[in-house]
Every structure is written in C-alpha cells, then in structure tokens.
Image: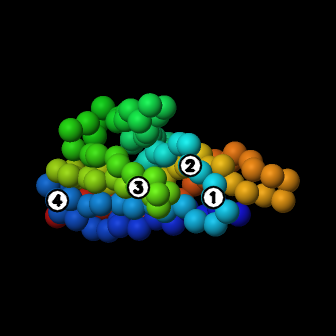
Amino acid sequence: QVQLVESGGGLVQPGGSLRLSCAASGSTRSVFFMAWYRQAPGKERDLVARFRSGGFRDYADNVKGRFIISRDSARNTVYLQMNSLKPDDTAVYYCNMGVVEATAMGDRANTYWGQGTQVTVSS
C-alpha cells in the first residue's frame, strides 16, 4: 500500500508565501506522475501544476509566475512553492501521484491522492 502525506498548509496574509510538500511512502517502486490540485468551497477540484513527460511543467493560468512545482525524485516527494498569494488561492490542496508499487501480484501502476491540506489567504 502507498500513502501520500502532505504538509505545509496554513494561514497566510495576502502577498505571503507557503511551501507545500507531499511524500509517497510504502511499497513505492517509482513515481511516474506528480501534480497538485486544489478545491475551493463549492467548486470542483482543479489542476494547479503538474510534471509531464520529459520533465516539463504545466501551470494553471491563474498561478503562472507565482507558483513553482518541483520534486525530489530520490525521496518520491513533490513540492509546491506558492508566492504572492491571493485570497482566491484559498482552498484545500491535494497532491496526486502515479505510482508503480510492489504488490503480491507483482508491480502495478496506480494513482493516489494526498489527504489534502488547507491553505487560507486572509488578512
């Protein structure tokens, strides 16, 4: 079984910064997909940033130039550095990983979600 454990959320004033972390643990062989999503109250879960094949990074238009996704492949960890935060960034942030894991039936690819971490931007 694989677990994704998030940390780094909290309350911050507009213009401030936060750094989120998400680490995969358990029977992880490798990680082939890493992304961050967020969900504001009453809204759908939206993609914030992701790595795609070739190491390229995609960002939602409303976070470009402010957020940076990075990773530590050796630690199966993905980060989201959030700068110049705005009240509209308030949401629960979720990491999402595609993982190859060891199972009794051999290696299998599955997708996992973190537990979510609250980010609140308010004065």
Q: Residue at x 41, y 55 (%)?
A: 72
Q: Quadrant of residue 58?
A: top left
Residue at the disc numbered 2: 31
- Residue 3: x, y in percent? 61, 64
Mark 3 vs 4: CB contact within 8 A: no
Mark 4 vs 1: CB contact within 8 A: no
Choose between 10 and 8: the one closer to the eye.
8
Q: Name which of mark 4 and mark 2 comes first in the sequence.
A: 4
Q: Which mark is residue 72?
A: 3
Residue 35 in sight in this render: yes
Of badges 4 and 2, the one in the foreground is 2
From mark 3 to mark 2, how far is it between C-alphas?
11 Å
Q: Name which of mark 3 and mark 4 comes first in the sequence.
A: 4
From mark 3 to mark 1, how far is it between C-alphas?
14 Å
Q: Name which of mark 3 and mark 1 comes first in the sequence.
A: 1
Mark 4 vs 2: CB contact within 8 A: no
From mark 3 to mark 4, how far is it between C-alphas?
24 Å
Please state if 3 lies on the left or on the right of 42 as rendered: right
Q: Secondary structure at mark 3?
A: strand
Q: Secondary structure at mark 2?
A: strand
